Every structure is written in structure tokens, then in C-alpha cells.
Image: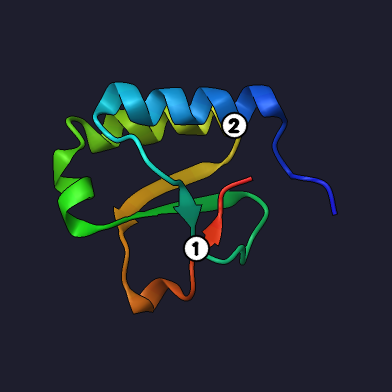
Amino acid sequence: MHPVFNIGQRTAVAGAFKLAGYEGPLVVAPVASEDERAFLLAPDNLRAIREVRTLEQVLQQLLGRKVFVVERSSAWGSPIPFE
């Protein structure tokens, strides 16, 4: 199975997170809908993000989907790598 997002999109997403204050592995909630992605961050990492809503808007433009950046918890299911 090939990645859903191209290398340019994945690189841009990592860059957007870096600019917002987070560098590290990116994981998402299991995909329930192709038109959404929920990025899951540990509580401390989420608090370190300077502008979560702005980051979500940038990611939505990069990926062409509704994007959420939320605290990682069991409610979101087992995280999977962003690709």
C-alpha cells in the first residue's frame, strides 16, 4: 500500500509542526474518514504548540482535509504513523 500523502505534503506537515514548536514523530488516529485526520500529541507536546488552531488551518490547506491536533488518549484509538 502506498502512502496517502506525497513526500512534499509529509515534509510540509513536519515543517509546520516544527514552526509551531513540535519536533518528533507524527501519529494520527486510525483513519475513519478519508476527509479528516486527527494528529495525536502527548499532553506536554500539545501544550508546547504555540497556536494550535492556526496550525490546524495550515495543515488543512496542506492536506486538503479537515485536521484536528488533539491530546493523545485512548478515546482516539491506537495511533498510526502519519504517512
**Is 11 rendered above or below residue 33?**
above
Outermost residue on the right side: it is: 1
**Is the residue 40 above or below the residue 48 in the image?**
below
Res. 24 image quadrant: top left
Mark 1 or mark 2: name the one nearer the start of the chain. Answer: 2
Q: Quadrant of the N terminus?
A: bottom right
- The image shows residue 80 at horizontal and vertical percentages of 55, 62
Q: Check the picture and name the quadrant holding the C terminus.
A: top right
Q: Nearer the viewer, residue 71 or 15?
A: 15
The residue indicated by pointer 2 is 10
Q: Residue at x 31, y 72 (%)?
A: 73
Q: Amino acid at mark 2?
A: Arg
**In the image, what residue occupies the spot 61% across and 62% down?**
31
What kind of residue is marked 1? Ala
**Residue 45 at x, y = what percent?**
22, 47
Image side of residue 8 versus residue 14, left or right:
right
Q: State the SS at label 2.
A: helix
Left or right of residue 59, residue 54 in this image: left
Q: Is residue 40 above or below residue 5?
A: below
Residue located at (27% from left, 27% from top): 20
The residue carrying mark 1 is: 29
